[in-house]
Every structure is written in C-alpha cells, then in structure tokens.
Image (cartoon, rainbow, N blue to C red):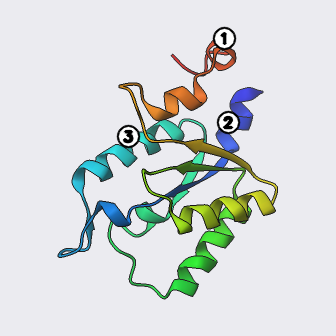
Amino acid sequence: MIDDIISIMKIFVATSYSSQVNYETGQVFPEFRDFLENQFTTLEQFGEIFSGIRYDDYQINHAAPDEAFRLDLKEIKESDVLVAFLGEKVSAGVQTEIGMALAFGKKVLLAPPAKSSWDILTKLFCTPVLRRRFLCR
C-alpha cells in the first residue's frame, strides 16, 4: 500500500537559483545543476516531480513573470507536497511558493543547506520509521 501512495505522489520542488547562475551565459552553474539533479533523483523515488529550474532547462527564464507565476500556481495546486531547498539567503520566490502550498493545504518539507556530508533528502526522508518500512537504505 505504501508503494502505491509513493508512486502517485506529485512533488513540487522550490529552490532559489539566482545566485547560482553565470549571468554572461544565463546558465546555472554545473555544480549546482549536478547537486539538484542528485536531489531530484532521490525525490523521483517517491513520485513525480516538478521544478521550475529543470522546466527552464537550467537557465534564466525569459518568460513573462506572470506566465511563470501561473505555471507555479498550477503545479503547486496539483502537487501533494512541496519540498523547498533553502539557500543561505532568503528567497522571495521560494517564500511565495511555500505560502501558496500552505494556502492550498499542501504538506511542506524544508531542506536547509547541508551542513554535513549527509545528503539533504536522506535526512528528510530516511527517518527510522521509513527505514523500518524499507523505503530507505
């Protein structure tokens, strides 16, 4: 039964990346892209994910802000949970996405910056209860 729930979960991933961009090329720094893809791979074990940064192919979005907002709003409404990767600096965009998720009654998981060699999502998802249910190693 747990596998059925996990396999249908839809996850919205919020992350600030304005400080992680080469503004000459508009591309997200490769190290940050690799970090996120690592996290996304872990999250995809729990369901389908949507992330604006991945949707924009890891580059600065040149769409009108209202278009980006409407897309985020739609994806958050359709999600079961929002996972917010918090940066060292406060992000108005991530705060807005968290607020929308809470307003729609969604679960919100906050992933603070890593302070150790442990993977952020391992800390969030691999609790003793989940380990007993064989969801994490």
Quadrant position of residue 102? bottom right
Measure the alpha-carbon separation of dots 1 and 2.
Answer: 16 Å
Outermost left residue: 24
- Residue 39 at what x, y percent from top left? 44, 41
Crowding at dot 2, Cα within 10 Å, few <14 / some 14-19 / many 20+, comes out as some
Q: Residues within 10 Å of mark 1 (few under 14, many from 20)?
A: few
Judging by the rendered image, the residue that carries numbered circle 3 is 38
**Can you say whether 80 is above or below 5 in the image?**
below
User: Mark 3 to mark 1: distance in Å?
Assistant: 24 Å
Q: Residue 93 placed where, x, y %?
A: 54, 68
Disc 3 versus disc 2: nearer the observer:
3
Badge 3 or badge 2: first in the primary sequence: 2
- Where is residue 80 drawn, in percent x and y? 72, 50
Say above or below: 14 vs 114: below
Who's the residue at 60% across and 44% down the image? 110
Residue drawn at x 78%, y 27% is 1
| Mark 3 / mark 1, whichever is N-terminal | 3
- Give the residue at mark 2: 6
Res 132 label:
1
* 124 or 70: nearer the viewer: 124
Report the number of numbered marks: 3
